[in-house]
Amino acid sequence: MGDADITLRHLARRRPGDLARAFVPEGRPIEVLGWVDSQVTNIERRIDKALRLRVDGEPRVLHVEFCFALRDDVPDRVFEYLGFLFAALRLEAPGAPVPPIESVAVVLSGRKRRLPATGKRRIAWPGRPFSGAHFRVDAVYQRTIKELRARGSVLWLVFAPLARDATAAALRQVVAEIHAGAASAEERAELYTALLVMATIDPWGHNLRKELIVMVEDKEEGLLRRTPIIGEMIIEAEQRGEKSIAELLGRLFTRRLGRRPTPDEARSMVERARAIGPGEVADALLDLEGDALVRWLAEPIPPS
């Protein structure tokens, strides 16, 4: 899914209010209080952190997880994270009520048929009343550019290449809107990089990435080549025809750990890219610290 410092998670941290407003009922007053950064929640290393809010003056917590696809393990991951999060919030304020928590899975690719609006993880015995967790499903790749634009923020425009009605003409307008709406040159570079990362996912087979790179370069000459890590790799991969995903992941590993991957680590990265997608592997490479990354690569690969 991209670089934690440049793409989705970094952009979400830069614009938390824009992220939250998409999931709070329209017209309700909302105040962003900050992120839940707890050692307890950090144990679940692969899931995005939660955002503290005040909605209508009442405390709320919003957990948003960006998913490459709505795989079978997503409900398990959401349920596990909610357990960590609930425990962390209780430890922070013993005896105080835990704020209501809403979980949202933002899905970037998958089947063409509409995904359900709600997911669930049931843990109750068969035949007993429901016990477990429900979460919202926001299949951004099944939305139109008009629907993404209606969310009122350049944060959501970076998902435009995923839209089912994405065209070169529509993306040219999106590039112009990002140029006008970014708060700084640094944020503009990050938004454009996220836009290109989304174009690599291409769930509808639009194949607009090369045109999009040209559009961005026309608008901001040389900007992509000045963008750290992922931006550099995108341009280089485009120039070389992306003939080796293994080499790209290996370079990203080397940047993170300061050494080349061992043969077993390189093989694990390629196998995981096949099983869960190269974006998910790149996301893990940029999210996990040294020892945690090495342990993750040594773990069994979950079934796809």
Image (spheres, helix red, strand yellow):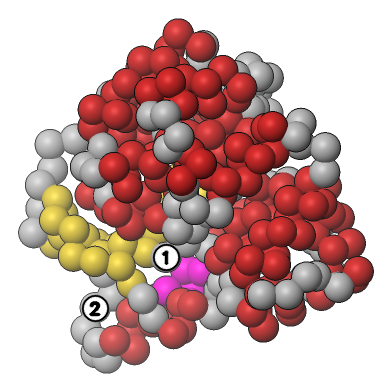
Give the x, y percent position of residue 231.
53, 44
Q: Residues within 10 Å of mark 1 (few under 14, many from 20)?
A: many
Please, what is the three-letter code of the amino acid marked with disc 1?
Lys
Q: Residue at x 61, y 22 (%)?
A: 210
Q: Marks 2 and 1, Cα distance to the nearest angstrom? A: 20 Å
Left or right position of 64 against 256: left
What numbered label is drawn on residue 97?
A: 2
Q: Nearer the viewer, mark 2 or mark 1?
A: 1
Of 233 and 116, which appears nearest the observer?
233
Proximity of marks 2 and 1: CB atoms separated by less than 8 Å: no
Q: Which residues are magenta?
A: 81-85
Q: Is residue 82 magenta?
A: yes
- Asked if residue 277 lies in the magenta stretch, the reply is no
In this orientation, does residue 77 appear? no
Q: Is residue 59 left or right of residue 61?
A: left
Q: Quick one: 121 or 33, which is closer to the camera?
A: 33
Q: Read off the residue under disc 1.
A: 49
Dot 2: element: loop
Q: Quadrant of residue 234?
A: top right
Residue 246, how many percent across, how many down?
82, 51
